[in-house]
Image (cartoon, coloured by chain):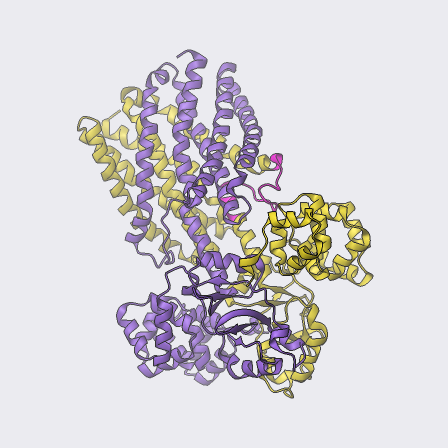
Chain colours: A yellow, B purple
């Protein structure tokens, strides 16, 4: 059981420096490729290349696939063509394509040069699928069977080719390349050897198409609890599979993208540290600029009530509290609705159900906040009950308005085909700031006859 | 290929009303349990029970497992004890436990009554693991082999018991119940029949423990791309497995929880509609109350600068813009850092790297915003270059401060063992409101000698 006796970075460096390569090689063989990448991350370029050269061929390919693009580029520059060829030979074609998409042109040329003709053709075919499509993430290595085969034939086929396939847990049955059924490896093991594949296959196969969005495909895998889903092209021919581990990565990336948008940051595919300062600034400036200019409207409105504030200066001290509470209430509602839409719990048709629920929540929350705030004002401002009352009414109105706007905007965005995530805190808060000021001054000027 | 000829709700209702049960039964057999649940969701209680009774035993159990708890409770009340017993017999023990945990006590009693003695013992054992632990989500049905077995023995064992196991893609090798290795089903198919399991097994098994947090286990499955991970108890004995489909659900729930906290909403396990109005109000009030009271500090500070605003009333119109921009800048940084921490891209030790990056981003963004805002002020306020300059300096200071506070607080929270997600928009915005007002008035009073 690995976890207890895994080497840490210091021990690895020690073995390297003492040139105990044989022992190091043996230790590396027992380690998971993902853990080796974690170790490489802590080493310098020269040490990395040394370690990489000690890895067995198959493991080297997996480590190469798992590392990030900067580390990979350094390594490619350090390896000879023949070393590189060995690695590329062991890699799955879809992983090779992922690697190529991230490399600068000169590195791509070198990598393409060391791959054989057949692989090169497959790579070119995969590179043609649009970004974020099922075709671009699918695996073209899978087991396909014919319905006339017996179970014994099928097992023989898996024995011959299966060792190189990324997953053989589900085999697909084709007829003239068209997908007609699937057989789980469990069924192969438990059915009699002489039974025909056509008799034991399941004809109800869930599938997706090459041009389907990768998020849609990942959600299908999640919804139906699959380990893989077959991908067919426009002629209904089976061309690949998407596996559950790829689906998990897609869902994680899509969530990161949603969360970025919800914070008013244009998403990009690179990691936080992998994104340059200028790119970070670019991703964040657009929204900031837009919201800054929108906020000047609130400022102008505030300026308009200058006289009211001159008569009753205390009014100004409640502005941050009201704007803050309005913004927070609106963000709470919009966030819950955005997430509900993302995981499929809420749909546009639920809009009136959502509004009704939010109004009831707003009344409870609004009365509670108004009461606490009222007591505070009563104590702090010489028992001024009129002020406490005016602020209480404003508070309930602001909370109710905030919750309504907060839940309606993401639903409308969804209906209009926009990403609901843009209707999150930054935009909602800016819109509500203006509304809050208007509601506040309309109520207090009426109340105190200003 | 199912998708093209699946029945929609209206067709199902038509078949039901015309009493075409035989045809309906055949159609249901070709449908995926998850899709049947989607259909049931649109029907009334009586129709649901009718449809449910038409399902084959095994399919009925899967549909029962996939439906939400309200629908399940209705159905349990409609079914007879013997019908219920049939469903429970077909269910996996871990799913039964999940069902029981969501049901009211009287329903639990009825469900426990119809299960056999052996299952009842297993249920009780599983119910004892703490919530959110690996033990509470694990599957206790898996294939365990002994190292003396041959491949043929192993396949025979899978044939005998495998049909009832939720996943047989990976088999585990035990010796006196202790986990000593694993064999992938691929290896069973591709190795010679007479080879010993002990010779082909992989001794480097990744595993987790019953008391490990479910999120930690789900992250391991994700990180290493596994289909299942074995779970061992405090005596290192194999007691269950967690499968990738369960891991995906755990990660999705944890993300929803994070996003809720980031919006200042205390998370709960129920869905949006499944949560009552009072519970929603409770989940949201705590933060709102806290933030409302904190915002009064900002209000008091604002009141303190009353005189400055009386001399230069125009100053008040810039407050919403500055507070809004500060809050948005801070939220952008904190959100990126919180997500980076959640997916393991950023760690506490990176704190100075993060601060350095954020300061550089802040300078670029700050100068840009100050310039745009300066031009606007120059045009709109009679070419008042001093005002444009004072606001420009304030803007750069506010953006830099916001980005620093925004990135530092989540990292500190992580270091202190708190959930970094609490350091998101609502709290950051409230803290920054106070800071922004202070920075703004200190700069302008110095600038204009107020």
Q: Residue at x 50, y 46 (%)?
A: B341
Furthest residue in direction bottom, as rendered: A194
Side (left or right) of B419 relative to A60: left
Check the picture and name the quadrant holding the N terminus of chain B: bottom right
Count the marks: how many? 0
- Towards the viewer: B371 or B248: B248
Q: Is residue A322 magenta?
A: no
Asked if B89 appears above or below A206 in the picture, the reply is below
Indicate the position of residue A402 as horizontal and vertical percent values: 36, 42
- Towards the viewer: A154 or B133: B133
Residue B107 in sight: yes
Q: Residue at x 48, y 17 (%)?
A: B387
Side (left or right) of B10 relative to A118: left
Q: Residue at x 27, y 20 (%)?
A: A311
Q: Is residue A260 magenta?
A: yes
Q: The magenta stretch spans which residues?
A: A258-279
Indicate the position of residue A49 as horizontal and vertical percent values: 72, 49
């Amino acid at each position: 059981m690995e976890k207890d006796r895994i080497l840490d970075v210091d021990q690895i460096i020690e073995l390297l420096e003492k040139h105990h390569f044989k022992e190091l090689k043996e230790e590396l063989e027992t380690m998971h490729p993902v853990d080796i990448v974690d170790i490489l991350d802590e080493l310098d370029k020269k040490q990395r290349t040394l370690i990489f050269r000690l890895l067995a061929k198959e493991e080297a390919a997996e480590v190469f696939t798992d590392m990030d693009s900067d580390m990979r580029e350094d390594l490619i520059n350090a390896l000879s063509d023949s070393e590189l060829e060995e690695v590329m030979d062991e890699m799955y074609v879809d992983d090779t394509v992922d690697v190529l998409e991230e490399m600068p042109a000169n590195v791509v040329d070198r990598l393409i040069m060391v791959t054989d003709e057949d692989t090169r053709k497959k790579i070119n075919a995969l590179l043609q699928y649009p970004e974020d499509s099922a075709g671009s993430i699918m695996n073209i290595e899978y087991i396909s069977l014919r319905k006339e085969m017996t179970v014994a034939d099928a097992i023989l086929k898996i024995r011959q080719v299966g060792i190189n396939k990324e997953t053989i847990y589900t085999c697909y049955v084709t007829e003239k390349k068209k997908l007609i059924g699937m057989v789980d490896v469990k069924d192969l093991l438990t059915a009699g050897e002489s039974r025909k594949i056509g008799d034991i296959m399941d004809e109800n196969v869930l599938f997706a198409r090459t041009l389907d969005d990768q998020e849609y495909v990942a959600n299908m895998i999640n919804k139906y609890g699959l380990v893989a889903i077959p991908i067919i092209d426009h002629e209904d021919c089976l061309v690949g599979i998407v596996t559950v581990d790829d689906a998990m990565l897609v869902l994680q990336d899509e969530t990161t993208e949603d969360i970025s948008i919800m914070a008013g940051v244009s998403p990009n595919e690179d990691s936080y540290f992998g994104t340059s300062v200028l790119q970070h600034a670019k991703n964040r400036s657009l929204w900031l600029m837009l919201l800054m200019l929108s906020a000047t409207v609130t400022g102008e409105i505030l300026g308009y009530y200058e006289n009211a504030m001159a008569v009753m200066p205390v009014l100004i001290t409640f502005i941050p509290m009201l704007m803050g509470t309005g913004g927070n209430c609106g963000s709470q509602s919009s966030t819950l609705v955005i997430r509900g839409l993302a995981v499929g719990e809420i749909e546009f048709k639920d809009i009136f159900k959502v509004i009704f629920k939010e109004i009831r929540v707003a009344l409870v929350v609004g009365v509670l906040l108004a009461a606490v705030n009222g007591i505070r004002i009563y104590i702090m401002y010489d028992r001024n009950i009129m002020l406490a009352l005016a602020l209480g009414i404003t508070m309930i109105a602001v909370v109710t308005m905030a919750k309504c706007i907060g839940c309606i905007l993401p639903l409308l965005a969804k209906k209009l085909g926009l990403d609901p995530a843009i209707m999150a805190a930054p935009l909602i808060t800016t819109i509500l700031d203006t509304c809050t000021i208007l509601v506040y001054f309309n109520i207090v000027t009426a109340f105190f006859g200003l």
